């Protein structure tokens, strides 16, 4: 159940209570990335409702489904999200009363790729406004508004946000595909774009035929972090040091790995697990200065983190190998590979990324720069210019590409599934020369 939807609705209500239409418009621009005209128009037509938010947060999925069966209940109105009627003659076109609710759905279900548009002149025979959904899986969705908003499971046990992509798994893999979809859902892993999803299906299918599937991935060193108190992004790195324990991203692997192992064992798919830790980050003098360590000490702490990870997995009866990505795994290939990709990326040549992922790497870079400026400024302990930020992101992208290249070189034609526990957007750069699928957890920092 997507409780982020309710929490964001509560924050909208609070913004209105604290500062009226002006404060609400500012909140909508900042949190929902609405343009000034949209934000002000929604704020002008907002209908405040007194809501018992704590009671709503404590409702189970079954309780919500029971409420939905009551056709006389307007759920979005009860959440304080229904807008007043708009003037249908103004230049903005037709604005349905549930537009604000759909903007929240888009915000709180980013991996579902909710694409909708509001036609300039679209009034059906009942005189009500409409929203058109570009993705076929969400057409005719008005009968299940709250189910989609809260991402509640349907009759097949899968919520609307993944129904389209889950259907591809079911069509190709049957019950195995359904089990895989539920595993990804429960472990809060993002369903990948369709091109990557098809490569995932291929790896699973080959495993079902008896080939050993390589489960691989790399995680960050144990950088210092702290809790944010937020549900959507619960942690943030402070980068004030590097420890010798299991780091924040590695903990994502601790969570995901047992579930995937159970899935593979249930379906008698042979597998081997090989992970790595990003010891190559010790190559950056700025990072070493930030965390106050020598390169040797940084790598030594990565080794200790790896051993603790292996020990924990062993306690779960899971055999894993965890390597230092540069010092042990790349075996002299790392710097040459990074240099090659840096030259290519700086020249605007992103090789096979678009072909392998369906994503535009230049747009992804722009998104990362806009969304992660504070993250990188904290990491490098200074305010970064746009040129500095781009240079850092490109440099990091070359590391993802290098890891993907090494996976391809080392595992050859074997079926491979790569796990990732950090920021989803940057994962596409691991597909610069390799088409192996990447499964990424939802971001936690």
Image (tube, helix red, strand yellow):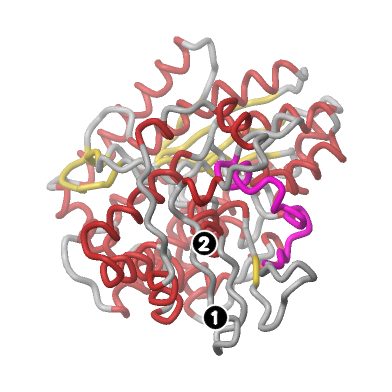
Report whether 99 appears left or right of 46.
right
Q: Which mark is residue 230?
A: none
Q: Nearer the viewer, residue 381 or 277?
A: 381
282 in relation to 263, above or below:
below
* Quarter of the rendering containing residue 140: bottom right
Residue 3 in the magenta stretch? The answer is: no
115 in relation to 37, above or below:
above
* Quarter of the rendering containing residue 160: top right
Q: Residue at x 59, y 44 (%)?
A: 146
Report whether 190 appears left or right of 20.
right
Sooner in the amino-acid sequence: mark 2 or mark 1: 1
Please state the horizontal and vertical placement of residue 371, each as a whole percent of the image: 38, 65
Q: Residue at x 29, y 60 (%)?
A: 16
424 in relation to 66, above or below:
below
Q: Point out the frontmost of discs 2 and 1.
A: 1
Please count the marks in the image: 2
**Extent of the magenta region:** 131-151
Please state the horizontal and vertical placement of residue 51, each as a whole percent of the image: 37, 43
Q: Secondary structure at mark 2?
A: helix
Name the residue beneath numbered marker 1.
87
Whether label 2 touches label 1, CB < 8 Å: no
**C-alpha distance separating marks 2 and 1:** 20 Å
Name the residue beneath numbered marker 2.
103
Q: Nearer the viewer, residue 242 or 181?
A: 181
Q: Secondary structure at mark 1?
A: loop
């Amino acid at each position: 159940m997507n409780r982020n939807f309710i929490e964001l609705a509560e924050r909208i209500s609070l913004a209105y209570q604290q500062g009226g239409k002006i404060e609400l418009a500012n909140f909508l621009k900042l949190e929902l990335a609405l343009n000034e005209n949209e934000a002000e128009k929604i704020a002008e037509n907002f209908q405040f409702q007194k809501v018992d938010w704590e009671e709503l947060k404590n409702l189970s999925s079954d309780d919500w489904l029971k409420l939905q069966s009551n056709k006389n209940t307007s759920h979005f109105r009860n959440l304080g999200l229904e807008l007043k009627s708009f003037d249908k003659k103004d230049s903005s076109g037709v604005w349905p009363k549930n537009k604000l609710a759909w903007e929240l759905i888009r915000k709180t279900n980013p991996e579902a790729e909710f694409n909708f548009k509001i036609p300039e002149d679209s009034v059906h025979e009942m005189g009500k406004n409409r929203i058109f959904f570009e993705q076929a899986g969400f057409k005719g969705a008005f009968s299940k508004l709250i189910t989609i908003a809260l991402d509640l499971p349907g009759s097949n046990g899968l919520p609307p946000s993944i129904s389209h992509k889950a259907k591809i798994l079911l069509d190709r893999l049957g019950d195995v595909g359904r089990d895989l979809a539920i595993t990804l859902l429960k472990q809060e892993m993002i369903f990948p774009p369709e091109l990557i999803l098809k490569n995932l299906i291929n790896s699973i299918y080959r495993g079902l035929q008896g080939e050993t599937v390589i489960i691989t991935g790399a995680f960050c060193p144990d950088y210092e972090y702290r809790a944010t108190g937020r549900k959507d992004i619960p942690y943030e790195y402070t980068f004030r040091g590097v420890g010798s324990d299991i780091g924040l991203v590695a903990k994502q692997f601790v969570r995901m790995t047992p579930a995937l192992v159970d899935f593979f064992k249930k379906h008698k798919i042979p597998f081997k697990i090989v992970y790595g830790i990003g010891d190559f980050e010790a190559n950056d003098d700025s990072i070493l200065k930030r965390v106050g360590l020598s390169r040797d000490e940084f790598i030594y702490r990565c080794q200790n983190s790896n051993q603790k990870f292996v020990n924990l997995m062993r306690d779960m009866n899971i055999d894993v190998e965890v390597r230092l990505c540069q010092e042990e795994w790349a075996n002299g290939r790392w710097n040459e590979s990074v240099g090659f990709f840096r030259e290519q990326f700086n020249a605007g040549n992103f090789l096979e990324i678009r072909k392998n992922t369906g994503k535009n790497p230049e747009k992804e870079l722009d998104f990362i720069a806009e969304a992660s400026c504070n993250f990188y400024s904290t990491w490098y302990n200074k305010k970064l210019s746009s040129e500095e930020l781009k240079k850092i992101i490109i440099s990091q992208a070359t590391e993802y590409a290098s890891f993907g290249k090494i996976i391809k070189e080392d595992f050859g034609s074997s079926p491979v599934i790569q796990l990732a526990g950090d920021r989803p957007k940057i994962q596409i750069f691991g597909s610069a020369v390799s088409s192996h699928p990447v499964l990424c957890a939802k971001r936690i920092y």
